[in-house]
Amino acid sequence: MNYRMVFYNIGRILLVEAALLTFPAIGAIIYNENTLISFALTIAALTVVGLPAVRKRPKNTAIYAKDGYVIVALTWILMSLFGAMPFYFSGHIPNFVDAFFETVSGFTTTGSTILSNIEAMPKSLLFWRSFTHWIGGMGILVFVIAILPKTESSSMHVMRAEVPGPTVGKLVSKLRASARILYGIYCILTIVEIIMLICGGMPVYDSIVNSFATAGTGGFGVLNNSIEGYNSVYSEMVIAVFMLIFGVNFNIYYMFLIKQGRQAIKNEELRYYLGIVLGSIVLIAVCLANTKYSIGDSIRYAVFQVASIVTTTGFSTANFDTWPVFTKIILVFLMFIGACAGSTGGGIKVSRLMILIKSGLRDIKKAINPRSIETVKVDKHTVEEPVVKSVSVFFATYMILIAVSVLAVSIDGRDIVTTFTSVIACIGNIGPGLGAVGPYGNFADFSIMSKLILSFDMLAGRLELIPMLMLFSPYAWARKYS
């Protein structure tokens, strides 16, 4: 491993985090809050740690595959540790493990929280809390590749380790240009949502932080009742639409930009994604219409909650934990599936689900006729066998991690629904689960050990498992570069 290059890149990213913390610090000044010193101390700590690491650029600037994974994993852990400091220093989250959990939940765009009274928090801290969603949504390392010089040659390994989905490639020949295109689309969509929410009467501050949470598909709100607290159908529908937009593979938007709209519309993953969304909305709306809800409210709640869960955002406009079992089962399925590859959403990803289903059908056909030659195809292109295998390995590892985590968290003695869905909500970067961690609950009463396990699950889920698991591999720390 090229240790010097690993530490050099981590140092640069920590300095970027210090720069990003100036935004909530300015907010503390604007709102005349006593949190300014907390942000100043955190910025100072990041500077002290980051500057020595970047003081001298290493002679060997090569970044190999395992180096990229380690850079990504350590970066997200360190960013969360430092990002937790403003909450801890200010005294608003006096337990550092709780502050770390909240910050990991922010950067991984999970939205699970230990706070019971969100509205009691200073606005500058709530801004930082939602801003971590926006930073983590597209990825801090993709951001660094986009803005900092000399990041072209070996950064594909870093980008591949951070961007969600079974495969990742360049949009254009230059990786830095690709990263800029991604962030350009990301910023424009965020700004459009902010404007639309303001036009609907939502306060400017609320519009900004809710758009950050939507763009990152994170779900941190600034009201105790989440989006329900605004009691605005317009705002709900705007946020629902943008949640679904941010759940789409960003390559699709690039295809529209280069006037390949027909090809984008024919994208198979997009069709699966929209089909899952529409089918779930219909089933849930019909089920809710047979209860206490009117047809209008049934459609309204179904649209918003399906959009929120399938994109792993986690906003809520109703307590879906009180809905019929059938609807809750559908929502749990959506928690597993997640959004599209290359989006800001979490979960297993629609593309992997497609490959798993097609791979299973292929194996059935081959069992019936062993001499037949069957391949897995997506968008009429054959999926290479290593990709099919990697998807199967990912799914198996995902299930094993869930099983181990559920077993470990069960030591707290909570009911099986709370225990199981708390793990699903964290590893899928969803936010709320069912039971005590439902839309009106939180994770405050979990033990310190469970919070650390769930924090690991959030990081593993956001980084597609491999970077976090690689930290425990002796091979990752070997001195051999290649």
Image (cartoon, rainbow, N blue to C red):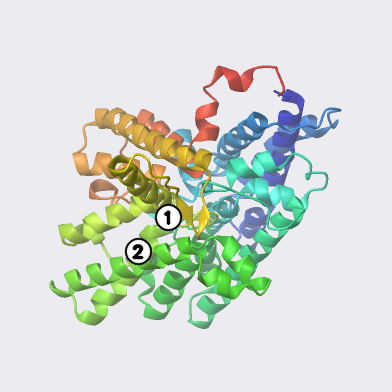
Q: Residue at x 28, y 57 (%)?
A: 331
Q: Nearer the viewer, residue 240 or 326?
A: 326
Residue 83: horizontal and vertical position, in percent?
58, 42
Asked whether the viewer can see residue 426, the reply is yes
Residue 437: horizontal and vertical position, in percent?
29, 48
Q: Residue at x 29, y 45 (%)?
A: 421
- Residue type at tag 1: Val
Q: Residue at x 46, y 75 (%)?
A: 238
Indicate whether 213 appears above or below 429.
below
Which of pointers 2 and 1 lies earlier in the amino acid sequence? 2
In the image: residue 327, left or right of residue 290: right
Separation of disc 2 and disc 1 at Cα?
Answer: 9 Å
In the image: residue 164, left or right of residue 226: right
Indicate whether 288 appears above or below 333.
below
Asked whether the viewer can see residue 116, the reply is no
Q: Which residue is mark 2?
A: 276
Which part of the image, by quadrant, shows the C terminus? top right
- Residue type at tag 2: Ile
Q: Residues within 10 Å of mark 1 (few under 14, many from 20)?
A: many
Q: Mark 2 falls on what kind of element?
A: helix
Q: Which residue is mark 1?
A: 350
Q: Are marks 2 and 1 in contact (CB under 8 Å)?
A: yes
Q: Nearer the viewer, residue 19 or 411?
A: 411
Q: Residues within 10 Å of mark 2 (few under 14, many from 20)?
A: some
